[in-house]
Image: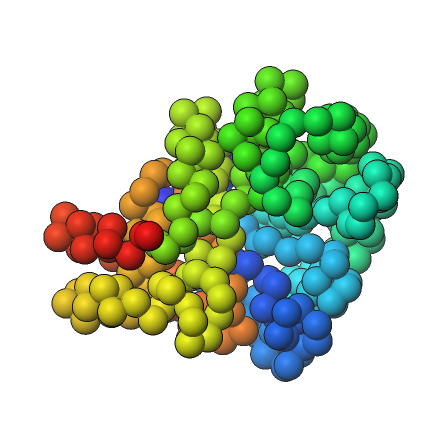
């Protein structure tokens, strides 16, 4: 089991993404007891990095985390995110979002909060205003670290020039490597890179990772699942990659964690490179 620092928090590289606990598209819990069970099983298995958001539900996932794990064990890094909703430029809503997370999770400080943008883009005055709110929240002790999500390489470099960035969350998986340059920059600067949807999008029969014949062939040869192959591939990319796959199943949780023990050989890596368009 390997670890990597998420700011001041040394975390296991296999974490847990809590969004799915609120049901399809984070709208309602399909099984409250099951959600609490999987959260407790994750922590019991050594997971110490949980990703969430107050707007999952809203409040619902944070409340599940609180009900399952409060009082929180020492060293548990809870990471959330805030987003600038709508077209109106109102940086103050980001501060409120951070405070809402603190309230619903019943904590005084979060390990990190990601500024989640609608999409990667250029650096502008709006982005600077948003960064200023995040920096003020860190100065006030509400968050231990600032993260960024859905960002461009330009935005990452600009933000890092003005403040410490502890993690980056961008879409990245076997079939979508658009953020490779962002990952490379994170490697260079030793910033945690957290790919969201590490098993691909969309879910279901159109998923380009889990339905890939190439991934299936590699998995069959190694005696593992296609999902485990996809997670192992990410872990082997770089030591700063942290995973947050989500599930509402204890069995799937254990399968995801077992991907840490899989080593993809050179043949497998060559084959898997065929999946990227």
Here the colouring is: rainbow
Q: Is residue 277 left or right of residue 67?
A: left
Quadrant position of residue 105: bottom right
Residue pictured at 42% horizontal, 61% vertical: 199
Looking at the image, residue 226 lies above or below residue 95: below
Q: Is residue 259 left or right of residue 222?
A: right
Looking at the image, residue 65 lies above or below residue 132: below
x and y, in percent, of residue 123 in the image:
65, 27
The number of numbered discs placed on residues in the rendered structure image is: 0
x and y, in percent, of residue 175 in the image:
36, 55
Residue pictured at 66% horizontal, 68% vertical: 26
Q: Is residue 266 left or right of residue 125?
A: left
Quadrant position of residue 198: bottom left
Residue pictured at 59% horizontal, 40% vertical: 120
Instruction: Single out the residue that lies furthest toward the top.
Output: 161
Quadrant position of residue 237: top left
x and y, in percent, of residue 170 in the image:
52, 45
x and y, in percent, of residue 88 in the image:
85, 43
Q: Is residue 6 left or right of residue 64?
A: left
Residue pictured at 76% horizontal, 26% vertical: 125
Is any atom of residue 26 visible in this view?
yes
Is any atom of residue 131 visible in this view?
no
For this rendering, which residue is in front, 255 or 176?
Answer: 176
């Amino acid at each position: 089991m390997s670890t990597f620092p998420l700011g001041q928090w040394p975390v296991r590289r296999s974490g847990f993404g809590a969004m799915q606990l609120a049901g399809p598209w984070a709208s309602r819990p399909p099984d409250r007891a099951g959600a609490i069970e999987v959260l407790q099983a994750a922590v019991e298995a050594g997971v110490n990095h949980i990703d969430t958001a107050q707007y999952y539900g809203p409040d619902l996932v944070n409340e599940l985390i609180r009900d399952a794990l409060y009082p929180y064990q020492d060293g548990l890094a809870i990471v959330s995110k805030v987003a600038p909703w709508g077209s109106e430029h109102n940086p103050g809503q980001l501060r409120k979002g951070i405070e809402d997370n603190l309230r619903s999770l019943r904590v005084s400080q979060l390990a990190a909060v990601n500024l989640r943008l609608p999409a990667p883009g250029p650096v502008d005055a709006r982005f600077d205003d948003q960064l200023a709110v995040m920096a003020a929240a860190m100065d006030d002790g509400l968050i231990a670290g600032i993260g960024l999500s859905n960002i461009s390489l330009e935005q990452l470099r600009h933000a890092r020039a003005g403040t410490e960035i502890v993690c980056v969350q961008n879409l990245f998986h076997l079939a979508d490597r658009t953020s490779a340059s962002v990952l490379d920059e994170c490697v260079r600067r030793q910033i945690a890179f957290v790919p969201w949807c590490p098993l691909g999008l969309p879910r279901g029969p159109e998923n380009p990772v889990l339905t890939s014949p190439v991934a299936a062939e590699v998995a069959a040869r190694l005696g593992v699942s296609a999902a485990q192959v996809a997670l192992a591939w990410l872990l082997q990319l770089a030591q700063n990659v942290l995973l947050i796959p989500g599930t509402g199943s204890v069995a799937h949780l254990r399968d995801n964690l077992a991907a840490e023990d899989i080593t993809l050989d050179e043949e497998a890596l060559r084959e898997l490179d065929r999946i990227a368009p």
